[in-house]
Amino acid sequence: MPTVLAGAGRLAPERIRHVASPLIELGCALHVLAEPRHHSRVEWAADVPLPASLRSELLQWTWTVRAVRARFFATSAATGVPTWSDEIAALRARAPEDLAAELVRPLRGRPLSSREVDVDAVRHWSRSRGRAVASLVEALLDAPAEPVRRFLDLLDACWSTWFRKVWDSSRDALAARGRQDRDLAVRDGVLAMLQSLDSSISIRDNDSAVVQKVQNKRIDLSDRSLLLIPSNHIAPHLFLGEIPGEPLTVIYP
């Protein structure tokens, strides 16, 4: 089921931005923790030094990092290398209702491009995931302040317990990869750069590329920008995030 990136040949390199985001990389790592066998990372997941209480808490929030993920795990307004403290502070500064809407959206499999949340459908699907998740989702829908704080505290706990060390060891290499890929677009063209990101991307013609790993659709890049986010935890996937008013996000290995 290919996705066609139309207009890529007309996308000016100056409309390409890259970021090495600790928040987005944590989201990718949590996705691996939720499905380590699919990513051939069973030993890595078992070695993550998580207290049992933290693992239990993460299990209740795994829907936020599945194939459809919360928006703040899929885009960033930053360029270069934002700090964890800045990214988590930006989330804490947002209205709980807004974050809650982003957190529940993946339960219904709503695409990032959707602006609507089907509350009845979210409740239905949350019940199918067990009593604890259903109770958590009810709180997000009806009184979001406390569960949103709980979720952000969970992210902070992941950071301080284990992910800070992971990030410190990979940050510079990810930032360098993003710079190199943007430089490649300037030197050899956007299509050549896109093809170099992953084996699932091929050049279709002089104006478009095809991505084989994601859903069957057409995305017009001719009048928008592109956000490159290299990741050590996205393989074997390639993630395309299409959010209204935002650059097309590409999270790639």
Image (tube, rainbow, N blue to C red):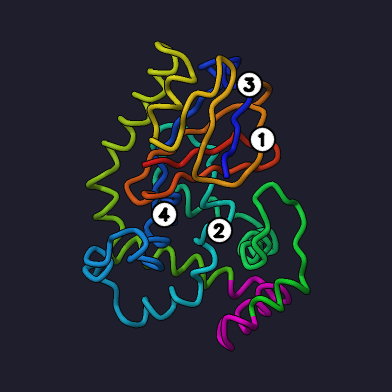
**Cα separation between marks 3 and 4:** 28 Å
Which residue lies under the disc numbered 2?
Answer: 92
- The residue lying at 28 percent from left, 66 percent from top is 45
Please give the label number shown on residue 28.
4
Compared across the picture, whether 135 is left or right of 230 comes to: right
**Cα separation between marks 4 and 1:** 25 Å
Q: Label 2: few (<14), some or many (≥20) within 10 Å? A: some
Which residue range is magenta in the image? 127-147
User: What is the three-letter code of the residue carrying label 4?
Assistant: Cys
- Residue 140 lies in the magenta stretch: yes
Give the mark nearer the N terminus: 3 vs 1. Answer: 3
Residue 37 drawn at (x, y percent): 33, 66
Closer to viewer: mark 4 or mark 2: 4
Q: Label 3: few (<14), some or many (≥20) within 10 Å? A: some
Q: Secondary structure at mark 3?
A: loop
Which residue lies under the disc numbered 1?
Answer: 218
Q: Is residue 96 visible?
A: no
Which residue lies under the disc numbered 3?
Answer: 7
In which image quadrant can residue 229 be found?
top left
Q: Quadrant of the N terminus?
A: top right
Q: Is residue 30 visible?
A: yes
Closer to viewer: mark 4 or mark 1: 1
